[in-house]
Image (cartoon, coloured by chain):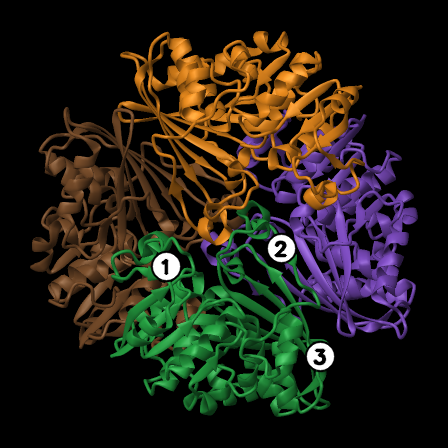
Chain colours: A brown, B orange, C purple, D green
Amino acid sequence: MIRVGIIGGTGYTALELIKILLRHPDVAITTLTSRDESCPALSEVHPEIRGRLDLNFSIFEINSFTEQVDFAFCCLPHAASAAIVKQLLACGIKVVDFSADYRLNDAATFNQWYEVEHPDADRVGSVPYGIPELFRPEIKNAELVANPGCFPSSALLPLVPLLGQELIESTPVIIDSKTGVSGAGRKPNLKFHYPECNESVAAYGVGKHRHMPEINQIINRICNQEISATFTPHLIPMDRGILSTIYVSPKQGVKTGALREHLSDFYRDETFVRITDALPKTKDVTHTNFCDISVSQCGQFAVIVSVLDNLIKGASGAAVQNFNIMMDFPETTGLI
Amino acid sequence: MIRVGIIGGTGYTALELIKILLRHPDVAITTLTSRDESCPALSEVHPEIRGRLDLNFSIFEINSFTEQVDFAFCCLPHAASAAIVKQLLACGIKVVDFSADYRLNDAATFNQWYEVEHPDADRVGSVPYGIPELFRPEIKNAELVANPGCFPSSALLPLVPLLGQELIESTPVIIDSKTGVSGAGRKPNLKFHYPECNESVAAYGVGKHRHMPEINQIINRICNQEISATFTPHLIPMDRGILSTIYVSPKQGVKTGALREHLSDFYRDETFVRITDALPKTKDVTHTNFCDISVSQCGQFAVIVSVLDNLIKGASGAAVQNFNIMMDFPETTGLI
Amino acid sequence: MIRVGIIGGTGYTALELIKILLRHPDVAITTLTSRDESCPALSEVHPEIRGRLDLNFSIFEINSFTEQVDFAFCCLPHAASAAIVKQLLACGIKVVDFSADYRLNDAATFNQWYEVEHPDADRVGSVPYGIPELFRPEIKNAELVANPGCFPSSALLPLVPLLGQELIESTPVIIDSKTGVSGAGRKPNLKFHYPECNESVAAYGVGKHRHMPEINQIINRICNQEISATFTPHLIPMDRGILSTIYVSPKQGVKTGALREHLSDFYRDETFVRITDALPKTKDVTHTNFCDISVSQCGQFAVIVSVLDNLIKGASGAAVQNFNIMMDFPETTGLI
Amino acid sequence: MIRVGIIGGTGYTALELIKILLRHPDVAITTLTSRDESCPALSEVHPEIRGRLDLNFSIFEINSFTEQVDFAFCCLPHAASAAIVKQLLACGIKVVDFSADYRLNDAATFNQWYEVEHPDADRVGSVPYGIPELFRPEIKNAELVANPGCFPSSALLPLVPLLGQELIESTPVIIDSKTGVSGAGRKPNLKFHYPECNESVAAYGVGKHRHMPEINQIINRICNQEISATFTPHLIPMDRGILSTIYVSPKQGVKTGALREHLSDFYRDETFVRITDALPKTKDVTHTNFCDISVSQCGQFAVIVSVLDNLIKGASGAAVQNFNIMMDFPETTGLI
């Protein structure tokens, strides 16, 4: 039985993580921390799991924490996370980090996009990027895994195999993403106030979203050249789910059907990536760890549609998948 | 006082049309027709206007209809519409047609995309396309105006001035549109059954949507060359509103700011098109006749966001705007 | 042309008020105040009316305000409102007050329910309660009208005629209300954060809601006895609309049909109250100033369903209706 | 390993049932039937479980069905269900029936409310009503269990213990229920067309809903007298979840706290019923088998709020709970 601690346990990803881990036969959640000094009751913060987990929130303290846990999931905001992760690693605790702190492989890029000095710059660049289907071997041997962003997961799962096989041009790569509001987290803000975003669609962060360098870094590595994907996220009036519509140009002579076929081959043995004939909708995958992907044609472009649940395959489900790989459990445990 | 008849009065666009016309000081709605033989009570079909319009639905009959009306709005499905419109015109009744029947300027293209023989093929090609801000002079003198599709309106309002001025390349033009469910009409269908489309986003009709030739025809005319815009509509869990995200390449040396400036100049005297600095959201324009447009930059692409209410600026509002132009009323009457 | 000032112009009721007044031919909005020292641009706060009102927010200052306006709508929170209203009245400005400050006819009751000392206690009890259909004569001659709460409006419109005519018992009167989230105002709060209240229903304030004494005060006055209605509000995942389901006992020998008939008679000449045969839904009245009411039977109880738009008939529409009465304009001006 | 067949597998309750059974370690789903002659692919009807269950829909045929299954869940509409259930029982197959066919204990009452002759009238009255927490002993020994209606479950879980202990008066019992749209099933219908029910609340079936006799029958049995609960369902714009607000009168001298205490005692050892201090919301229980219940006071009435997921605790979760009891599995298997 692995003793697991969750750091930053009041948000939506933490709730999903708890729910998944409660179904995991080899895990005992032993500690939940919150930075809220008032330490509210668990059933008040997450009434959904009332009666199912006999724990209270505590303030993180490195000694007591490391005594109680074998493995940590860190759900803190960027910068706050790395400051704690480096302490955990120093104590020999393995970690999946939900923040962006170890996703980029260059501290300068991090500092620029996140406008803060990276608290653990030396480690940056050596941490596996936790999309299991793409980077399983590195994840397997890691002490720390950088859990990927939700938008990047939806885009990279179809793009990496196609770019890697040179089936599509490296430009244009246009990623038009639509996300449910839980992606914005649990902190109240006028933009996510119900009457503001209900019955409305909006683009946001055009040209400025922090998931853009994350996407570009991976596809640059795959293509071995400087690529600039165009990425536009949109806020959709629903709780959860991401649908990314991706416009790419097949290489001369490559048919759309060949793209679909390659993706089918590439993911043939993967449980959680499904290549579909019909256009998938987010509802096909919400509350699951699946990512469904279709490929269609529109004029000279291939139109890829990729859907996943931002809180599960885009966060906590992927985290547990990474945990399973790191700890040698069957990869689907707790997730199906 | 203009006596107005509405043909096909049970749908959502008809309801919006009735509500607008009830606020129009120079209009009396004298006839409402429905193809439903049971002729349900108006307050049953549209409880919202209960007590505000003392009319019942009748079955369309050309003689009694033309006796009672000076002007007709035809809200029938494609093909059904043209069959009636040609009779109305023969009787000297002016018409705004909501269907797609007179939008394309080539009957063969119509037959191919709509899979039916056009019932009034001779007239096709000579009917103004009713986006008032773009084609006002032709509309002014017309007996019949083809009210434009909701998606094309959202795309063409920003694209036509930019392509016309040669500020952007004619390829790629990628239009990623998001629409509320009322765009699908009022006929029950599993796809639009509440629990199917609520809390979900889906792309549909990729590469096959009938608004694509409509968009391409207009921009081809403007650019004087064969252009293929890529158009992907998405169904969003909300009642109304369209947001189109349009990805274009500015011509060499043209800055994004110049695109915005040109749009501002172009629409300076237009009441219903607003060029905004902030990214617009559909809620800024739902229940109004406005179309709000912004221009941003993302890498080498300009990202245009255009929002309107599919039932108003994308249908019934535009129709009344066309009516006002055809009948020499101030263009904003009933619409503001 | 009446010069109108709106105090506290950043909220949802203020936006609806502005939109209605922009359609009112006899009104010019000359001042908009906000307590936000940053005085944000109007188009930033209310992008919907961008370009339609050439005003900026200012901080309220009694002298400049009274120079510019003939009539004031005060949309401030309770207690803040009365402190300003008494100054306005002293300067001879007529006022419709949206707050609860002058709704209760007893300052002690106010102090107890609102947990603050009333800033204008002497005037309490002499201010008409602004449901036009019920209290038109007093409103007509008033300098100040207390605009009613949204829940009380939905409940009192059916209850007052029935209790006044002694057609129903004075107990039990059970009011189960369902409201859209805009009723909670525009200030962000975890409870109204999109992912918290979307896809969920909750009761709140059971036995403690401040609209309960407001309802009881009016029905006590009508019945001339101490009555305690039971009132439970519920938060519904939608923007706007209130539906109140009201359970009452017809007096011995009174049939449900007689209740409906009496309501029909009572409201025969009223434009904005419609007694319906079918069960009304909130969508029949949202974005309008109508209140639709039905009466059904379930066992020994009559089940009354009453629907209105909380921001219009439940707030800004009623306010303009009161304004029209106070200023001798036709009552429906701007509202239909 | 129990071989399970699902009859009528295309609806929403069937989908939830499949998902639960896929997590049940002792169950193999061996047959899925549909009355749709076209036998659509499973992944087309339920894309969510694509790749997880290698079965196609077949048309029900008694011999092949009984060869392949040990236990049947019957998800057919009323009357259609009993016609098949009696055949299954004759072949020795145990059944949980989702329809209303065996819920009422009197065929005449069934015929009257469902307006059809009961196809298995002799068995009516001898079948346990499948609320496990209330009727576990009968369920344990049954060949057939009548799975309860979703509204009755939400109302009876709090009412039965309180009426049984004579802590509340038997009148008035007013049940005001709010349900998500999935409760209406998967068949398209104008009432459940997205733009009709989105952003709207409506009462329906006032005084006529078929769950009313079901509720009354059980509380009459408990109280040993003719009781008429007043029951009004409302349609809420959300996928799933029921919240019932129940107004009852505590007996003379009984405090609201005593009601809560008795419910806490009564359900102390039950996993799936949680008595809460805070007012529960549907989101606390959707996608789970829990029913959360609170008791508050408003004047002389106790206000009970009860929430559950109509598709799980109100249908498929309860069904599997009954299955577990009937087959001697731990009651929470697959459900937590």
A285 displayed left or right of C94: left
Instruction: Evaluate whether label 2 is on the same chain as label 3.
Output: yes
Where's residue D156, x and y in %?
57, 80
Label at residue D201: 2
Tell me the distance, in whole angstroms, between the alpha carbons under discs 2 and 3. Answer: 25 Å
On the image, numbered disc 1 is attached to which residue? A12
On the image, numbered disc 3 is attached to which residue? D228
Q: Is residue A162 above or below residue D100?
A: above
Q: Are marks 1 and 2 in contact (CB under 8 Å)?
A: no
Going by the numbered disc 3, the residue's amino acid type is: Ser
Please report, as a chain letter, where disc 3 is located: D
Quadrant the N terminus of chain A occupies: bottom left
| Quarter location, residue C236 | bottom right
Tell me the distance, in whole angstroms, between the alpha carbons under discs 1 and 2. Answer: 28 Å
Where's residue B269, x and y in %?
57, 13
Q: Are marks 2 and 3 in contact (CB under 8 Å)?
A: no
Q: Is label 3 in a helix, a strand or a loop?
A: loop
Task: Write the residue at 11% across / 30% down.
Answer: A225
| Quarter location, residue A67 | bottom left
C201 displayed left or right of D268: right
Label at residue A111: none
Q: Is label 1 in a helix, a strand or a loop?
A: helix
| Quarter location, residue D256 | bottom right
Task: Give A147 or D233, whichever is nearer the viewer.
Answer: D233
Task: Give B33 or A199, whichever is nearer the viewer.
Answer: B33
Whether residue A14 can be seen here: yes
Task: Write the residue at 21% across / 75% down.
Answer: A68
